[in-house]
């Protein structure tokens, strides 16, 4: 469901994207081509900053926002999801937050006030708060990464994890195309 926010902003969704009918997209949200938004996801840009404005939540092409994901932003801060990124079931991305290209965010993970650089993999139930992750950083499941964390202790994404991330992204692009075809059956 696409909804206007109290400030009058309406989501801008590419006709080449797929939004599940149970998902809620509210306010100043921009969704590009071949983005998949799964069942019960909530993407909500409705809080104003101190100047009475807000930055958009932008989801770039070929990304997927899976079942039950919540993307929101505090006080109108920006949220950007780069192209080819996968955000798995029930993850939370809370702005301000920048997620670059080809990133994998695992089930139930939480991102807040952070920058996740290109090619990172964050496994399930991890928390990343108040930090910039270098490119291709691998964060294991259940880790808590913050400003006091020693980032050098985390290894670089291995080929198997990279392949898994790419397969998830490609599968979800195929879902966009498949669900687009099904629209004509109803």
Image (cartoon, grey):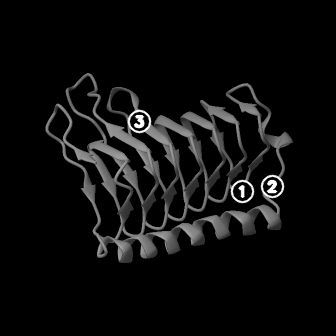
User: Could you tell me how far apart the alpha carbons at marks 3 and 2 are, in whole angstroms?
Assistant: 29 Å
Residue 126: x, y in percent?
A: 70, 36
Looking at the image, is mark 3 or mark 2 earlier in the sequence? 3
- Please tell me how crowded label 2 is: few (under 14), some (14-19), or many (20+) other residues with Cα within 10 Å: some
* Residue that badge 2 annotates: 156
- Residue in the foreground of this view, choosing between 126 and 75: 126
Residue furthest toward the front?
Answer: 186
State the SS at label 2.
loop
Question: Helix, strand or loop at disc 1?
Answer: loop
Q: Position of residue 133 (x, y in %)?
A: 67, 44
Query: 5 and 145: which one is in front?
Result: 5
Query: Does label 1 or label 2 sit earlier along the sequence?
Result: 1
- Residue found at x 40% / y 33%: 73
The residue at 59%/30% (across/down) is 130
Task: Give the farthest residue toward the top.
Answer: 50
At horizontal 13% and vertical 38% (from top left) the residue drawn is 8
Q: Which residue is mark 3?
A: 72
Q: Taking 13 as reference, is 26 above or below it?
A: above
Crowding at dot 3, Cα within 10 Å, few <14 / some 14-19 / many 20+, comes out as many
Left or right, 173 with respect to 150, comes to left
Q: CA distance from mark 1 to mark 2?
A: 6 Å
Residues tagged 1 and 2 counted as in contact (Cβ below 8 A):
yes
Say which quarter of the image contains residue 142.
top right
């Amino acid at each position: 469901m696409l909804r206007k926010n109290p400030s009058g902003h309406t989501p801008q969704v590419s006709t080449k994207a797929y939004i599940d009918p149970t998902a809620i997209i509210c306010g100043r949200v921009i969704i590009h081509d071949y983005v998949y938004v799964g069942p019960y996801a909530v993407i909500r840009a409705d809080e104003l900053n101190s100047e009475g404005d807000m930055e958009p939540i932008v989801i770039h092409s070929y990304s997927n926002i899976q079942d039950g994901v919540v993307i929101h932003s505090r006080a109108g801060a920006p949220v950007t999801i780069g192209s080819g990124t996968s955000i798995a079931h029930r993850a939370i991305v809370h702005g301000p937050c920048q997620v670059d290209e080809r990133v994998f965010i695992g089930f139930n993970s939480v991102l807040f006030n952070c920058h996740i650089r290109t090619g990172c993999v964050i496994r399930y139930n991890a928390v990343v708060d108040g930090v910039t992750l270098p490119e291709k950083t691998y964060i294991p499941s259940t880790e808590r990464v913050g400003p006091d964390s020693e980032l050098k202790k985390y290894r670089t994404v291995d080929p198997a994890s990279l392949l898994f991330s790419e397969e998830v992204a490609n599968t979800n692009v195929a879902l966009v195309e498949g669900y687009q075809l099904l629209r004509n059956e109803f």
